[in-house]
Structure formats: C-alpha cells, structure tokens
Image: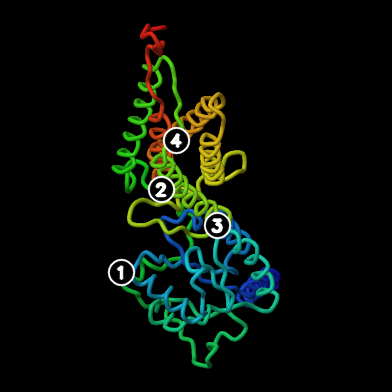
C-alpha cells in the first residue's frame, strides 16, 4: 500500500493540473463576430486570407467568426436584417461586412484597421458575444451559445439557448459557415469561360478591326493632308472622350475607395478591379485611362486652332495615343479572359471608346496619292 501511495499522489497531482488547465481554458474570454461575404468577391477573399485566417490561428478558439454567404437566400435575408438593425447607410452597403458587438466594418481597408484592436479590447473586457441581430437564432438555429461576459442573456434580456445539437437545414448550411482555410483567393473556375466572355471576344474583334483600318489607311496614303476638324467629328470626339472620362473616373473612385462597383448584368468588374493588374507602378489603370482621354481632348482642341504646318504633328500625336490605347485595351481584355478569368463591362466600354476614337482620328486624313497640283495653264506638276 505504501508503495502505491506515491503513484496515486502523482496521478492525483496530474489530474489536478489537467483539471485546472481545462477550467482555465473554459474560463478564457471569447470574441464572436459575423462576416457577410460573397464567394466571388475578391475583397472578401483578401480580408479572409490575409487577416481573419491568421487571426484565428493566433487566437484559436478564443476568436469565433461566423461566415454568412450573401449569395444564398438565407444569407442575404440575414444581411438585410443586419442592414436595417444597424442602420447601415446606402453608401456603405456591400461585402465584406464584419460586425462585432454593435460595430460595423465594411471593406478591405476598414476591417484590417479596426478589427484586431476590437478583438484585443473584447478579450480584455471578458469577451464579446454574437452581434444582436434580430432573428439570428431563427435563421441560424445551430449557432453556439453567446460567449460574452453575460452568456445567459441577449442584449434585450431574453435567454440564449445553445442549439448546437440541432440541424439548420440545407439552405442555411450552405449560406452560413465558419471561416475555413479552403476559401482560397481563387474566385472563379479557371477552366470555365468567365461570364461575359462572348462580349469580350466581340470587343477584341472590333479593336482588331480598328487596328487593321488604321494600318490600311496610313500604309496606302502617300501624302497626308490633315484638314481642319469638322463640327461632326469634333462632336464625336468630345462625346467619346466624355464617356471614357466618366468610366475612368468611376473606376478610379472604386479602386481608390475600395468600394464595390455596380457591375451591371454582364461580367464581374469587382474581381478585375481588385486584381494585381488593376495598377501599374502603383497607379490605378483607371487613372491612367482618365489622363489618356484628357490628353486626346486637349490635342483635338489644339488641332482645330493650330497653324496648318503644326496640324500634322498634332494629328500624329493623336494617332499615336489612340493606337497605344487600343493596343493596351487589347492587352487588358486578354488578361481578363485568360489570366483574371473575369470580365469587366466598364473596361470593355472604355476599350470600345478607344477603338472608335482611333477610327475617327485616322479616318480624317485625306488621301492624295499623287499630290498633284495644277498650274494656271493646266500643266500637272508632281
């Protein structure tokens, strides 16, 4: 009996340590938050992969994030309830939206700036429970119990019941999930043609035709005669540059503000705008596009008022800038089709505008292959 006593005391001591550790883990504060996201949203993938997943690795089970897919009916229903409950203004609607307690964060810039500090403050305060979103338990009945400082009550005083053993139904299960590591940065299936691929190919063909027209026009002209721009061509140039400027300024705003763009019925412009190819040397491509259209408008104005001798130089500058813009638009469209696997309707609009500008500029040259002049006596002089 005496020989077994040390072994018994050792086992008892180890059991006490294990119990103490388990109790300490149970008493550890937990922060709970809800992320509204879309599987096709590149900003969501960036926030998840670069911020939330590393934070979950750091905090373990002390950080619980519920992911709600807003492309599903149940997820969109919960999102709309949250929008009304927290009075989220129209200009802040969109994903990713992360809610912790009563704090709403929107976008890939705002969430990383605020969420880490809110988690630290929540843990220091004893934990933060699930956001007080009406009908949350009805839509997500298998949600774990609240982990805040008072886990037995909601903010309105009603009791919280842990329905972890209940099933939520297939629709809610597909709409609601924990943030998982398999949510990769790949937003689309690279083997399948992106939405709007047919339109993108049509625009590519149009740009190629514009290049063929420009090449034919310049190669078959021996002596260039650049007339003063007509009022019709001037109106066309300014309308086209106005459309191009509107598109470029809008996309520049989306890129700089990190807001969600209104993409329309064709394509996924947000994926394109959030990609690595949306900037060149840190400058948004849309900003470069706006500068391009401004340069075209200014050169066209100069073409109307410049002396005849300088007119041809200005025209060549216009040809050069519209040629460069068309080639660059072909390059960007090819990236959308083969690399990004997403099509931007706004970008296609800008590509069409650039190609038409090239046709208008090159088409104004007057072909005079022999440049013959007739003297007063009617003799032809070469």
Residue 8 as seen in the image, left or right of residue 65: right
- Foreground: disc 1 or disc 3: 3
Label disc, if present, on residue 170 of the rendered structure: 1
- Mark 1 or mark 2, which is nearer the start of the sequence? 1
The reply to whether the C-beta atoms of the residues labelled 4 and 2 are less than 8 Å apart is: no
Q: CA distance from mark 4 to mark 1?
A: 65 Å
Which residue position is annotated with label 2? 344
Label disc, if present, on residue 229 of the rendered structure: 4
How many C-alpha atoms fall within 10 Å of the one at disc 1: few (<14), some, or many (≥20)? few
The reply to whether the C-beta atoms of the residues labelled 4 and 3 are less than 8 Å apart is: no
Which residue position is annotated with label 3? 258
- Mark 1 or mark 4, which is nearer the start of the sequence? 1
- Asked if one can make out residue 1 in the rendered structure from this viewpoint, the answer is no
How many C-alpha atoms fall within 10 Å of the one at disc 4: few (<14), some, or many (≥20)? some
Query: Residue placed at 42% from the left, 80% from the top?
Result: 163
Residue 257 as seen in the image, left or right of residue 340: right
Query: Residue placed at 52% from the left, 60% from the top?
Result: 259
- Mark 2 or mark 4, which is nearer the start of the sequence? 4
How many C-alpha atoms fall within 10 Å of the one at disc 2: few (<14), some, or many (≥20)? many
User: Which is nearer the eye, 324 or 257?
Assistant: 324
- Mark 3 or mark 4, which is nearer the start of the sequence? 4
Measuring from the top left, give residue 205's x and y in whole percent. Answer: 31, 34
Q: CA distance from mark 4 to mark 2?
A: 33 Å
Q: Secondary structure at mark 1?
A: helix
């Amino acid at each position: 009996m005496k020989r077994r006593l040390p072994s018994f005391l050792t086992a008892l001591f180890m059991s006490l340590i294990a119990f103490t550790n388990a109790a300490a883990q149970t008493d550890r504060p937990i922060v709970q938050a809800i992320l509204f996201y879309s599987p096709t949203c590149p900003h969501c993938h960036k926030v998840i992969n670069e911020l939330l997943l590393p934070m979950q690795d750091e905090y373990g089970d002390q950080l619980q994030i519920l992911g709600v897919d807003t492309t599903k009916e149940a997820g969109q229903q919960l999102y709309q309830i949250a929008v009304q409950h927290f009075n989220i203004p129209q200009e802040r609607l969109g994903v990713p939206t992360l809610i912790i307690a009563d704090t709403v964060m929107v976008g890939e810039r705002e969430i990383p700036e605020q969420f880490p500090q809110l988690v630290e403050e929540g843990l220091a305060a004893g934990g933060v429970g699930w956001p007080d979103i009406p009908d949350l338990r009805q839509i997500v009945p298998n949600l774990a119990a609240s982990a805040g400082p008072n886990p037995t009550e909601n903010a309105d005083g009603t009791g919280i019941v842990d329905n972890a053993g209940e099933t939520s139904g297939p629709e809610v299960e597909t709409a609601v999930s924990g943030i998982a590591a398999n949510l990769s940065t790949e937003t689309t299936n690279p083997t399948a043609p992106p939405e709007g691929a047919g339109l993108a190919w049509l625009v590519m063909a149009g740009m190629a035709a514009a290049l063929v027209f420009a090449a034919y026009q310049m190669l078959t002209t021996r002596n260039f005669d650049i007339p003063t721009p007509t009022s019709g061509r001037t109106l066309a140039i300014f309308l086209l540059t106005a459309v191009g400027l509107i598109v470029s300024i809008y996309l520049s705003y989306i890129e700089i503000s990190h807001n969600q763009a209104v993409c329309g019925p064709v394509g996924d412009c947000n994926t394109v705008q959030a990609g690595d190819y949306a900037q060149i040397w840190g400058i948004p491509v849309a900003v470069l596009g706006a500068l391009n259209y401004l340069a075209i408008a200014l050169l066209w104005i100069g073409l109307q008022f410049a002396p005849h001798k300088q007119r041809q130089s200005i025209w060549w500058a216009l040809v050069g800038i519209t040629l460069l813009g068309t080639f660059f638009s072909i390059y960007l469209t090819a990236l959308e089709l083969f690399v990004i696997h997403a099509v931007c309707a706004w970008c296609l609009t800008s590509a069409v505008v650039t190609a038409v500008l090239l046709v208008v500029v090159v088409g104004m040259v007057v072909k005079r292959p022999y440049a013959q002049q007739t003297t007063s006596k009617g003799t032809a002089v070469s």
